[in-house]
Image (cartoon, rainbow, N blue to C red):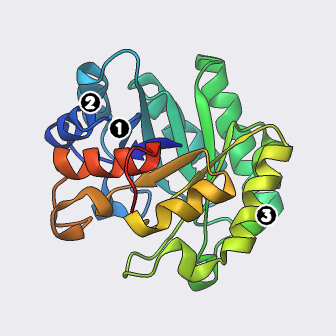
Amino acid sequence: MIVLISPKDKEEAKEAIEGGADIIDVKNPLEGSLGANFPWVIREIRDITPKDRLVSATVGDVPYKPGTVALAAVGAAVSGADYIKVGLYGTRSYRESVDVMEKVVRAVKDIDEDKIVVAAGYADAYRVGSVDPLIIPKVARDSGCDVAMLDTAIKDGKRLFDHLSKDLLSEFVEEVHTYGLECALAGSIRKEDIPALKEIGCDIVGVRGAVCTKGDRNNGRIKKELVEEFVKLCKGNEQL
């Protein structure tokens, strides 16, 4: 299972890199679950990240404004992100979600065919009025994305598994794989969730709070030792 760690600045990125994270995911937690960071921060983190590791960047918990989102995605791509993640926060239907992601895919792939586009939905979409998370696999497939992802929109201590059962998440992963895509899961993931994520076949697990001091995604700081522990558990080198 690939481990994605979400630093908010260069110093945290160094901790994530030294801790063994596979993907360095540039995020700004103050702007939301998938809050976008600044272009210069993406560039700084890309510059210090080893060439054999990929950098991801979120473009935000986006509204239903395909042009605005496509332009933001281009900004992330030219700033050095290999993965471009879009949080489908303001889309209310399959049609709107596909519309946004089609435009993002076209904009990003025009720059570099090798860039990886991620359609991200929210397990707790019912709390914020976002598109049903269980249609995200079809959205990703029909818009030409590379990865389908779920996160949580509201960070109040409730986790991915509090909103969707293990069986539903297993079906989600299976459907994503049926379409030949990769599946990423996040949402206040804890160490004790790792066995279930492995069992259902998750490809990429994304965390921030779990590797921050005091488990606090907003006020805590990513630390190398916490990243190392999480990575070891995900790679199967330790038992819970």
Q: Position of residue 45 (x, y in %)?
A: 26, 30
Provide the residue designation for mark 1. 21
Q: Disc 3 or disc 2, which is closer to the eye?
A: 3
Closer to the camera in the image, 83 or 159: 159
Provide the residue designation for mark 2. 45
Closer to the camera in the image, 89 or 8: 8
Q: Position of residue 212 (x, y in %)?
A: 22, 59
Q: Earlier in the sequence, mark 1 or mark 3?
A: 1
Secondary structure category for the residue under label 1: loop
Q: Is residue 202 left or right of residue 131?
A: left
Q: Give amino acid for label 3.
A: Glu
Q: Is residue 140 left or right of residue 79?
A: right
Q: Disc 1 or disc 2, which is closer to the eye?
A: 1
Dot 3: within a 10 Å radius of its alpha carbon, few (fewer than 14), some, or many (20 or more) residues? Answer: some
Secondary structure category for the residue under label 2: helix
Q: Give amino acid for label 1.
A: Ala
Q: Give amino acid for label 2.
A: Ile
Q: Earlier in the sequence, mark 3 or mark 2?
A: 2
Closer to the camera in the image, 155 or 36: 155
The label shown at residue 55 is none
Which residue is at 60% across, 31% downward?
116
Provide the residue designation for mark 3. 171
